[in-house]
Image (tube, rainbow, N blue to C red):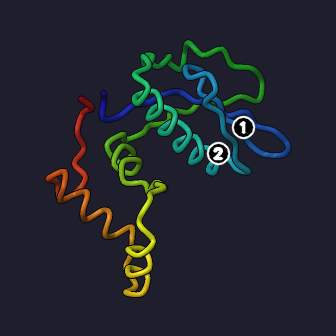
Amino acid sequence: MKDSYIYPAVLILGEDGVSVEIPDLPGCLTCGETAEEAIAMARDALSLHLWGMENDDDPIPEPTTIPALRLESGQVPVLIDVWMPAIRDEMANKSVNKTLTLPKWLNDLAERRNVNFSQVLQTALKHYLGVEDHRHETRP
């Protein structure tokens, strides 16, 4: 896995805004009302698309060079860069919902004492697993 990627994007200027596609990554599309907004959205779309490919162990293609792009009228090429360590950490620390089962008496007692169930579970899991916080690691 690389720390950073730079891919060409194609801005498609329209009357109702700016669409963006990343030609090397089919399905990586976004848009914005202005070119600046579209480029910011393209950075988000590219980073999440690449993160998903990394997680699925999909091969990540080499980026096409800008001169090799086949552009039509109203299309503008730009380079979009992403820094993946920040994206990987953000996604690893994203909250997820879990359903769990407790005996009613334990749930009632914890609620009476205003227990923060999420915090207690996180603390207990960290202790059980012998970790303090998230460390970016390569997958086993």
Question: Nearest the camera: 23 or 125?
Answer: 125
Q: Which residue is mark 1?
A: 19
Residue at 65% in and 33% down:
29
Q: Residues within 10 Å of mark 2 (few under 14, many from 20)?
A: many
Q: Residue furthest right?
A: 15
Q: Mark on residue 7?
A: none
Question: Nearest the camera: 62 or 77?
Answer: 62
Q: Is residue 72 above or below residue 86?
A: above
Residue 120: percent from left, percent from top: 31, 69
Q: Which residue is mark 2?
A: 38
What SS does tag 1 mark? strand
Residue at 58% in and 30% down:
9
Q: From mark 1 to mark 2, how far is it between C-alphas?
A: 7 Å
What SS does tag 2 mark? helix
Q: Is residue 4 above or below residue 135?
A: above
Task: Locate the N terminus by quadrant.
Answer: top left
Mark 1 or mark 2, earlier in chain: 1
Question: Nearest the camera: 44 or 136?
Answer: 136
Position of 101 with respect to 123 (left or right) is: right
Task: Locate the C terminus by quadrant.
Answer: top left
Residue at 74% in and 20% down:
72
Residue 133: percent from left, percent from top: 22, 57
Q: Residue furthest left?
A: 130
Q: Residues within 10 Å of mark 1 (few under 14, many from 20)?
A: many
Question: Nearest the camera: 111 or 38?
Answer: 111
Three-letter residue code for mark 1: Ser
Residue at 56% in and 33% down:
78
* Tag 1 near tag 2, CB within 8 Å: yes
Residue 116: percent from left, percent from top: 38, 76
Three-letter residue code for mark 2: Ala
